[in-house]
Every structure is written in structure tokens, then in C-alpha cells.
Image (spheres, coloured by chain):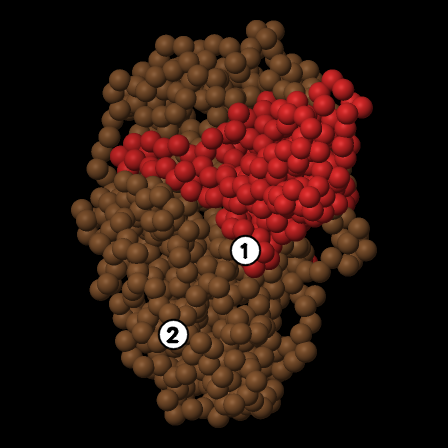
Amino acid sequence: MIEFRKDLFRDERDDNLNEIGKPTQRQDMVGHVTGRSPFYDDHAFEGLLHLRCLRSPHHHARLRSIEVRDAERSPGVHRVILAKDVPHNLNTLLSLMGFGLDDEPLISGGKVSYKGEPVAAVVAESERAAYDAIAKIRVSWEVLPHVLDVEDALKPGAVTVNDTYPGNTFTYHDKYDHQKLRFGDVEAAFRQADRVIEGRYQMSPIEQAPTETCGAIAAQENNGRFVCYTSTQALFFSLGTAAKLLNVPSNRLHFIGGTVGGGFGGKVDSLHEPMAILGCMLTGRPVKYMFDRAEEMQVGAPRGAERWYLKDAVGRDGRILGRQLTGYFDAGAYTRLSSYAIHKSTGHLPGPYTIPNVKSDVYCVFTNRTPSTAMRGFGITGVDFAIESHMDVVAHEIGMNPIEFRILNAYRDGDMKAHRRVAKNTALIECCQVVSEKANWPIRDDFRRMASSEGGGVGEAGRVPNYTATDQNGLVDTRNRGIKRRPGDPERPFSMPGTIPPRAEPARQPTPAPTYAGGGPLPGFAPTPGTGVRSEPRPSYAPSTTYSPQPVAPAASVASTQPTPASSAPPTPNRTGPNRFSSSVSGLRRR
Amino acid sequence: MTLHPGRGFAAINYPIGMNLGGDPSQALVHSNPDGKFTVALSSIDLGQGMKSVTRQIAAETLGVPVEDVYVDTADSDTGPHCMGSFASRGTHRVGNAVIQAAKEARAVMMEAAAEELEVNPDDLVTDGKGNIHVKGAPSRSIGTGTACAAAQFKQGKTVSGRGIFLVPLSPVDPETGEMTPVTCFAHAAMVVDIEVDDETGEVSVTQMNSAYELGRALNPKLVEQQLVGGAWMGMSHALWETTEPYYPDRSHGPIDFNDYLMPGPGDIAPHHISILERPAPDGPFGGKGPGEMCANPVLPAVANAVFNAVGVRITDLPITPEKVLRGIRANGGAKPQRRW
């Protein structure tokens, strides 16, 4: 049952519109209910090959060697792809926004940091043939100690999960191992409080569980371009990521998507598009790379676990005088988007309440598990569970009606929030009142009469506190958890949105003409000359004109290759692929 | 065995759009000679109804019937840049870009109509049914299709528009966390009624009552779909789902829907929803975006209801029968709490 309370906020709305507010049927409804809407997996190219990955069986291990000769000779196999075949094999998703350091390879060659991390990909005539070949790859592993708990990962002497961040935390502002929120003085609030109430809350990892698993199909287009049908939630985000990893100009990629069988945040990571396109480049054939359900659940990034500690100072009248929070986001082995969620959660604290003293420290922690990523409510769902559970605990402890307790502390128009912006357009109180009435959960008359637009911003509630207690805890240098900088990294690599370092506009490279190797009709992929992504010469990727297993070219001797550790990658130029979204031309760079 | 009833409450707000901004979306709108409009986007429709919402926004802004608008999206060769469908940004960001593009196209259509009718364009209005007429004089009118045809075939004008919406990127202070996270917030409050079986520890949700404030319900059916499904997901998150049942231990991770537990049709509780609409000053027609926030209040409300029913405070999700039963035993039996 759904009802529209048009009586509330009526004077703030024009309800006489032609199309807005109408229950118009969706444009794509008929296609969806008749099963005719094309999803990415509906693009069945002739000669489609299938890509499957060999994945780490260990939480944390070093690859001593990887032997793929038998796999390459396995029936139906067109190509075995290893770390060295990825043109620019190190990325972090938010590098497109200038946030964070590249920390994750597309295919790992040095060490693996989670169970399920890909170390080789096989492109074959069928999934069966690919799996059969994968079974023939022999890897010599040196198993390393691992860490799975966020607080264990922060202890001195913990193993380093991610070589880019040796202290197992993302670094904020090139300075701290966490993001701070400081507003007023919580210690003073604890001293003045009638009650101090603490709690610990743990949100488990969950799966986005889309009906359609993540994937992409790539094929050659004319004129050296590649078309990619994808399940991505972010078309240009995935295109930019693929262009960077594959070191091709973005206009050689043509991405088509837009009808997706459920996303919920799990289709932003852009793992499949670059892999499918790379497979296509290396074989000259259309290639599909799609998670099966087991991969979707255990290798595909889940909503990460979060652990929150809360401590509230509560006055005799039920007002919250101070709230202190410590949050640990379990990023898993690589950053993906977790670094962003820490900022989002920090901006959300202390929840929709006006509290005069707030302090929080939120950490993005690396552990030896599947990297986590976005999911519906990213950065908010876990802390809302913690805050609203804790609100219930406090209401119980002080013997107050939980709805009245929320309304008493609710933020109102004009109140100063802990991130130092004035609240406007608020409606928490009205939501509480409507639900109280609907569910027959009575509240006192004075609480029924309150309004979000009344009584806010009065006195101290409308101002930044006169005194805010700050500290330098968690300085990265102080704790000797310095960030390992690679030669060639920008001077301030840990920029965040809003503090993007000046970046020289890189020289434009001429777009290479497509290379037609082997006299075949299919354009192959040749590394762009002169971009300097690798210092050593690389083998060219010549597709075969026949679709038989390829003999290993001497230049690319794969057998018993000692993989190059990712961390010793040669210097990378500022620009390796596409324009970053927040480049200097967009005028967004500020300090 | 006793079934203990319990009810829990939670209230939340939710930030709309990418935190700190810096996430532009663009739109292009153009008309064919018959006055049928195409909106070109690269945004993704995940099933949430992105195409429908932007179509209604374009039609409203252009002043044409929704049937005269088609949304073409997610081809990187034809759709202008969009950051993507996440962070509850679709309606807010893309909707605003579509408004800007549609306004520009509408202005050309109105100029063309004014030239045909030999009046001042400022005196013209659209009726939303495919006609443009002089304000207060409906008989002096021209069809939107005729106006668009005249623009293209007689006047040599392109009936088209470009739009972009950007909340500029803003910084975060390292010492205090001062920031401008977003420009508007949605709100919700919820009461969940449950029953707890003190022999098995099983929790069943019997009813949900909720109030969601969304700025503006641009399409009430799509809003309903989001909220009903979202609450289901929240319920599932609270009571069933996890990829790592013994987190941080990685063992026993499910790999299919036999082991990855989710509620079935028989577990779904009646959900009574009230929609509140306090328009966001910078939202498209005030709209905020209900997509993500709808699951959030359910998790704590269920946990609070379990405490209310049997006196066991579960702080680790999901709230499995095992955890409930261990809690009841540790307390020496179920301890129902006060009903308000």
C-alpha cells in the first residue's frame, strides 16, 4: 500500500504539471516483459571466444613461476594471457578522478592478495575448453601469511596486503591513515554528560546479487576500433578504465550498454571490459568474459564489511551532547571505490541529528579478501545500521520513547551540521511523525506538533562551535607507515577530489594506425609507439589468421616466466590512456 | 515454543549524488521534422527507470506529450558523457542536464512557432498535448510538430539543445572533515513489526510501516517499485544475506542461490508506505532520488525489533537464528521489552 501525503510541504510544490508525477509506463516495458530487450549477453557474434581466469587458491601468495605451455596446446585454446600481456597493468578506479594511487593489476604477476585473484586468462572456443586449459596451467606458489580482520591489519607487524599502501590503510591528504571529522570537543561532552553509552556494530559483507552477472563482449569494429557490449553501470567510467589499462586512445573504443539486469553497485568495477577487449586484441576474434554465479559471489566485489564503534554523551533531558565514532571499512585487497566511501560516510556523520560535539576517525583498511566495492547505500548503509541501532540502545537506557528521542535530536532547517554546512530542506521530523501515526506508535502531542522548518538554527545549534579539539593522530610519517612511491609518481599522488595536484597536460601522441598483422583481415593491436608505458620492448600482438592454438613466439616466451612483481613496474607517465575526467581543462583543479 | 512480537523503529537521511560533487552528466535533445524528440544520453538504465524519468522530465520541459519523446542511451559514440548510474545521482544529475538541454530546444521550437504565428515568442505557451498557443487565446495555435517542421524546412533552425549538470568538486579538510558532501538529502522513517520464535531463534517480519521523503515523486509507480524492492533488500540484508557467514573468517562462503540465503515470497511482509515530497531546491522539479536509501532504515529497525521482542541486542549482521538463540540462552530466556 502506498499513499502520497500531498498535504505536507504543499506550499513548497507546484502540483499542476503535465508529465511529472504521472505513473507513465516505462518506455522499455514491452521489451522487458516479452524478453526482447537486448542485454549485453544477447550479442552472439559469429566465432565468439570465451575467456576464463585461473584464480589464486590462496589468500596471499607470491608467484614463483607460472607454466602455461600445456594450456596453450590444449584443444580449442587461442591464447593464454598473463600479466605481462596487459599494456598498462596497474590501475585504481578513481584515478579517473585523480583520487588515489594505482594499486591493482588486471592480471596479477607478482603476488596475489586475495583468494580468487586472477593470474592468467585463457581464451578458447568454449568455456569448457578454457577450463580444461586452465587445469593444465602449473603455478609455483610461495604462500605468505595473511590478515583478514581490519583491526588485526592495523596492528604493528601486520603483513602488508597491498604494496602500494604498506601500512594497510589508504592515505588521506598525503598525511593521515584515516579521515578525521572534528566538531567541538567530545571529551568535554563526555565530562558533562549524564550518561555515556558505548556500542560496537559490525556489518557483514553482502553480494549485490544481480540477476545478470557482470560481463562484457568485445569485438573488432572497422578501422581499428573495438566495440564492447557491457553490463556496466557507468559507460564512460568503464571506457576510460579500459583505455587506460590497454593504453589505447579512448576513441578507439565504442561502448554500448544501457540495459542492465540489475546493478546495485556491483557493476562499476570495470574488470570485464578491458579483459574482453584485450582478449579480442590478442586473438582477433570476438571475446566474451562473464562471471559465473560462483565468481559473482566470491570473486566479484561485494559490499564490504564495516565495523563501527560509537560513544554517546547524553544529557538528562535526552539530548545527545557528543558523539564519537571510529569506523573501519574493509576494502579487501585493493582500493576500488572504498576510499570514496570513507569520505561519504564522514560527511554523513553523526547521522540526521544535531549534536554539538562530534568526533570521528574513519579508516579504509586493506585485508587479504576479495576487494569490496559499491553497493546500494555505499558508505551510508553500514553506519546507518550502527547509528540507528545505537539510538535505540540509548533510548532504552534512558527510558525514552525511541521516536520522541529521534525527534528531540533531529536536525532542522538552519542547524549547523558536523561537516560545517547549514542544514536545509530537512524532513526527518515529518517522516517520524507520519510513521508514528501510521504504525500506531503514539508520541506526545508536543512532538506531534514540531516541524523541520521551525526551531532550527537557534543559538549554538546554528553555529560552528567556538572551540574544536583537533589532533595529529594517525600521521602516516609519524607511524613510519610511509607510502612507497614509485619513481615517476606525481609529487602529491594521494590527491582527493578537490585537492587535485597540478598536472601538466601531456603531449598528445599521434593515434597509431591500426596494424594489420599476418596479412589477415582483422586489425591487430600494436602497442602505441613512443608512449613509454614500458621501458623494455614488448612483443607485438599479432592475431593469427587461423584459429588454432598458437605456438609461443620466442619473444614472448611464456614458459617458466618469472613474473615481474607489480611493484617494480617502471615509471609511468602522467597520461597513459584517456583524459581523466577531472583534467585541467575542466577547471576543477583547486587546492 | 513462544512467538514473541516485537517492533523496532529507525530514521535516516540520505545524501543525493556523488559525495563532494565533481560528477557531471550531459544530455543532448533534438527534434525530427515531425516534432518527435530524441534525448541522447550515455546514462545506464539498471531497471530503476532512468529512461522513463528522463523522458518525463524532457516532455515536461519541452511542453510536449511524453509519447513525443524517446530516450536513447548508453552508446559512447552517440551519447554525451555521464559519470554513471550510482550514488543516487541519476535522477538528480541527469535529470537536471536533460532540463537544460530541453529548455534550449524548446526555445527554438517556440521561436519557430512565434514566427509562424507572427507573434512574440514570450506570449506563447505549450499545453502539454502537442500544441503551442498564444497565452489566453487558445485558438491562435500551432502544433509542436508543425512548428518543428517549419523550423527545419522553412526557417533553417535546428530544434536542439545541449545540457550539462555539474556540482563542482569540493575539497575535504584533513583536520576537521569540513566539506560540502552533497546539495540535498532524502529522508525516511520506519517501524518494523516482527515475531521471534524463542525455540528456533527465527525472526519473521510481519509488517512494515514507512515514510519516505523524496523531494518529488517524478513517477509514483517507479517510486513504489524502488521502495518496495528496496525494503525487501534491506530485510534480506538484516536477516539473511552474507557472502562470509563467519566474517572475518572466509570459510563457508556461498557460491550459488542455494547457499546464499535470501527471503522467499512467503517471507515478504506487507509494507505500508507514505510518500512525503519536500522539493529539493536544486533537484529536477524538486526530485531527489529514492534508489539507494530505501533499504537503509530496515536493517536497524529489524535489529531494534528483535531487541524489543526478546531482549537480545544483535550488533553483527545478519541476524541469524543462531545468533538470536545464543542471545536468548545467554540472557536465561526471552526478555520482552516495553511496547510504546
Tag 1: amino acid: Leu
Image mark 1: chain: A
| Residue B252 x, y percent position in the rendering | 56, 60
Please state the horizontal and vertical placement of residue B8, each as a whole percent of the image. 61, 27
Observer-nearest of A540 and B67: B67
For the point 26% across and 17% down, the residue is A466
- Residue matched to label 2: A528
What amino acid type should be assigned to the residue bearing mark 2? Thr
Name the colour assigned to chain B in the rendering: red
Q: Quadrant of residue A366?
A: bottom left
- Is the residue B127 above or below the residue A314 in the image? below
Mark 2 residue element:
loop
**Residue A527 position within the rendered picture, expressed as x and y whole percent measured from the top left:** 40, 76
Q: Nearer the viewer, mark 2 or mark 1?
A: 2
Q: Residue drawn at (67%, 30%), measured in percent from left and top?
A: B114
Q: Which residue is mark 1?
A: A235
